[in-house]
Image (cartoon, coloured by chain):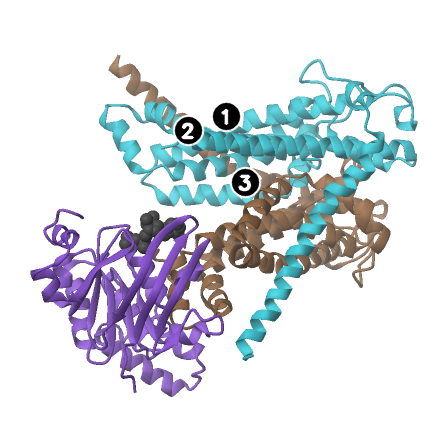
Chain colours: A cyan, B brown, C purple
Amino acid sequence: MDKRKIEESIFKVLMIISAITIIVSLGLILGSILYKGLPSLSWEMISQTPKGGYYLGKEGGILNAIVGSVLLAFGATILAAIISFPIVIFINVYNRQNRWLANIIRLTFDILWGIPSIVYGAFGFTIMIFFGIKTSLLAGIVIVSLVVLPVIARAIDEVIKMIPQGLFDASYALGATRLETSLKVIARQASPGILTALLIAFGRAIGDAAAVLFTAGYTDYIPTSIFQSVATLPLAIFFQLGTPFPEVQARGYASALILTLVILVISIVARLLTRKYKKFKI
Amino acid sequence: MIFNRVLKDKIAGKTMLFLTILACSSLLLIFAGLIFKSLPVIEKSSFSELLFSSKWHPLKGEFGMLPFISSTLWVTGVSIIIAVPLCILSAIYLSEYAHKRILQLIFPIIDILAGIPSVIFGVWGLILIVPIFGYSILSGGIVLAVMIVPVVIHVMIEVIKTVPSELRDASLSLGATKWQTIKFVVVKKALPGIIAGIVLGLSRAFGETMAVLMVVGNVVKIPHSVMDAGYPLPALIANNYGEMMSIPMYDSALMLSALILFIIIVVFNVFSRLILIRIERNVGYNS
Amino acid sequence: MEQSSHIKVKDLNVYYGQNHVLKNINIEIPNNQITAIIGPSGCGKTTLLKCFNRLIESVDGVRVTGEVLVGGENIYDPKAEVTHIRKKMGLLSQRPFPLPMSIYDNIAYGPKIHGERNKKELDRIVEHYLKEASLWEEVKDRLKTPAGSLSIGQQQRLCLARGLAVEPDIILGDEPTSALDPQSSRHIEQKFIELKEKYSIVFVTHILRQAKRIADYLIFIHMGEIIECGPTKEILENPKEKKTQDYVLGIIS
Ligand SMILES: Nc1ncnc2c1ncn2[C@@H]1O[C@H](COP(=O)(O)OP(=O)(O)O)[C@@H](O)[C@H]1O
Ligand SMILES: [Mg+2]
């Protein structure tokens, strides 16, 4: 056997080992969360708010955190979409010729994407202190929307960038303005991509802990207005695992399982939707 | 009627421009805010003391951040050293050698795992890694590595898939082996994307807070080996920012650590962008 | 050294999954001539060409039976060593695909792969084959620039030089001029005519006039079967088969 063959064989073995290592460790994550979380997962946990002494091992559940996380992630995703869609339209439709501006904006979003969410959280908290604002659902939504803004913007941008010039021209040729073209043609053409982007952002928002740590607060109640503090799932996990009581820690694992399941459902739905919509794309 | 439509178009354009400028300036805004808040501590102590001293005694007004900075570098470094070779090798294997069905099966799973929140990886670390390696830099690095693997592999496979098969054919038809073709042509063509994937993983790992905080030990001292406990910058902020008000300068010092994270991320992104542009120019992207 | 043909095909069958795309191919490719494979689109021309150097194997789910003899050796023999078979054949694809490296390294790639380390010798090889492909004058001052910066026509000549640099006996081309402008196409055609002294050339084309201009020998394929083959003149002037007549007259296309 010549040298090149030996080198190839060695690398092939290494590659297979790497692939197996990765697959096993990723499998272990789901496995261990399931193993630790399943025993204390109960209907009570997802249908009740914490009762008195919950964090000492007494009755109750984490409905407050589930509802809180969903509200927060929903709000943040919508807000981020409302801000990012016009920006993406601006660089891809209104200012299509100006590559330079578009590249600056893309770079900005890439950097914003890279900024750790703890920085957003701490920064937001500072501003809140400055203006005397208390922790609330609204504050959490605003800060988390900053975290997911680049995610949505770049994802939608990638989709719209791919739309051929011909489609723009066809619409302009019919006398449509840029706004009409954007809303009626481009947005429709990009809708599967936009939907996926929203779902990805939603998943990101629901899982983010560092940004809500100081901004959304934490309470045992389900909020009745956006100016109240709100509990979130990642923090619920974090706090419960931080207690010294095994029963409470076990519920922390169960909460982790709940969060994982929520994320899995979102990703699977996102994939199914994209697959379904792809059929209608031209 | 026509005026109305055109007017709407114009107004929408201006609104969009405004939002765009706002988004771009948000970066500057955050930067300015962080500087503004960290000025007090910078003015009080010198830069070198803040960055290179390991004396961290907030109550005495000493804010040497070296333990945190070095912990951050250690944890990120360990995670990259573990994750990058694994990712490159598996990405090549899955896209070049493995049966197509295997890729079709594994790719969506990797994709889905990329969306799992970091807290979950932290929990996994507590369950499986900490019992083996204790609360240490190594545990933090492993948890981070596993966390960034799906993201990085996803990018790498996507990129390798875009290398046209005719390019492989061109190399094979010259009598190159499959491995030579991969090494000299496929990887080279995919290099910018591979680097982009590494950069993405690196910035993720660098700023990750919760997952690391849960397994790294949070002990204020400069780590000397991977088995030592550490205390990275993001964990410092997360653990203390809520109750820093009572100690003077403490909030400013914490803002400074946020500023450090911010600056490193920005510099890092811009640099990698420049490197990518250079590589693309050298490799000569035509198709 | 060879008295027989470089390429001889015996009972070749190719399947893509269930799809039987080449049926009982038996053919001999004449040496030091230009052979053109013609036929309507989708009839299996590219597939046949890829069988000659086993590139067909990199297609997923493909199955090949039968023999292809290159220099008397069956390349589909399980014991056959594929890289040295491929070295005997240079390939020009439909669009030029320069390797992601400099002009110089594109040519030096093959010789380096096959163990040539001597810098001087590599320099000589690069210059020689760039001249052989009539590209030297145009690129000699920028050998270190990325090959992607050349025009498409120049790239295709670069790919030709790259293929020649591993010293093949045979040149394969899959519609090598279809992405080129008319002048660059002429250039390649001209090269083929010059090169046939030293190499056997097999190329696929869907342009009948091109085949007529440069090919000595024609293979007409329809629906995966060889309908007719023979010297160009014979086939074009008095085709024996009805299908060939139709194709030549432009009824099938
Ligand atoms: N990778 C592939 N997988 C499945 N079928 C293929 C593949 N490549 C080609 N085919 C089919 O094989 C037949 C012959 O293809 P090809 O050799 O490319 O034809 P030509 O080059 O004459 O146009 C066509 O019907 C085509 O659809
Ligand atoms: Mg073809």
**Is the shortest distance between ligand 1 and the CB of mark 1 under 8 Å?**
no
Left/right of residue B129 with respect to residue B147 in the rendered view? right
Residue designated by label 2: B16
Which of C119 and B223 lies nearest the eye of the viewer? Answer: C119
Is A23 on the left or on the right of A168, as rendered? right
Residue at 81% from the left image edge and 19% from the top image edge? A49
Q: Are marks 2 and 1 in contact (CB under 8 Å)?
A: no
Q: Please, is residue A231 above or below residue B145 in the view?
A: above
Residue at 36%, 36% in the rendered image: A163
Q: Secondary structure at mark 3?
A: helix
Residue A8 spot, x, y in % from top left: 56, 70
Of marks 2 and 3, which one's residue comes earlier in the chain?
2
Please name the amino acid that badge 2 sits on.
Met
Residue type marked 1: Ile
Q: CA distance from mark 1 to mark 3?
A: 19 Å
Q: Nearer the viewer, residue C5 or B4?
A: C5
Whether label 2 touches label 3, CB < 8 Å = no
Left or right position of C11 against B84 = left
Q: Which residue is mark 1?
A: A82
Q: Tell us which disc is closer to us: 2 or 3.
A: 2
User: Compared to A184, does C26 lie above or below?
Assistant: below
Mark 1 element type: helix
Cβ at disc 3 under 8 Å from ligand 1: no
Callout 3 crowding tier (Cα within 10 Å): few <14, some 14–19, many ≥20? some
Describe the element under mark 2 as helix, strand or loop. helix
Chain letter, disc 3 residue? B
